[in-house]
Image (cartoon, helix red, strand yellow):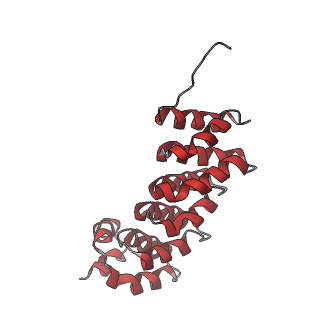
Amino acid sequence: MTVLDDLFSGDDERAAAAAPLVAAADLPALAAALSGADPDARWWAVAGLAHIPGGPAAQLLLGVAEDADPNLRAAALHALGQHGGSEAIPALLRALDDSSDYLARLATDALVHAQPQAVPELISILKTHPHPRVRANAARALAFIGDTSAIPALFGALSDDSILVQHWADEGLERMGVGQIYFKP
């Protein structure tokens, strides 16, 4: 039995044990499974791709991050977060506006792993996006990344109309040691 036999066996325990063992040589089989009709095989292909470093695996995951199946999108966003590569940033930023709060949260978590490369785009979203939920996700990501270049944008977000945006802006400033300072005029 091969790793791929176990991955696509239909037995979740065997597949879970096999996923970390897939290798770059398995990319063609994983790509074939992704384009197939079996949702279980597609999901396990994404789980396997999460363990393969490098651009070709990330490119396959980026395609799945736009899939119609929300379960596959969730698995792909999680895997892209594990990869942490800057090539995933545009897809992850688009996913911040996903209609599913869960998927938007996974994208936010994945952007935290991308770290400094995502900061300029996250700042822009925080300042300009029309939807408060998306701005809150951007503020949350910036809070966890902790890049000091976001401090001015986070201060500006303290007066956002959304209490959630305000919360994450305050949290980010606190994490960076720039909490609220109260003084008499």
Based on the displayed image, in which of its 4 quarters is residue 158 positioned? top right
**Residue at left offset 68%, top offset 14%:** 185
In screen coordinates, is 75 left or right of 66? left
Along the line of sight, which residue is nearer the eye, 11 or 41?
41
In the image: residue 26, left or right of residue 110:
left
As drawn, 141 above or below 40 = above
* Residue 46 falls in image quadrant: bottom left
Residue 110 at least partly seen: no
Residue 131 place in picture, x, y as percent: 73, 48
Q: Is residue 161 above or below residue 26?
A: above
Q: Position of residue 153 (x, y in %)?
A: 63, 42
| Position of residue 9 in the picture relative to residue 34 (left or right) | left
Q: Residue at x 47, y 35 (%)?
A: 175
- In the image, what residue occupies the spot 44% across and 80% down? 56
Residue 129, x across and y down, in percent? 72, 51
Does residue 43 appear left or right of residue 161 in this picture? Answer: left
Q: Residue at x 58, y 37 (%)?
A: 168
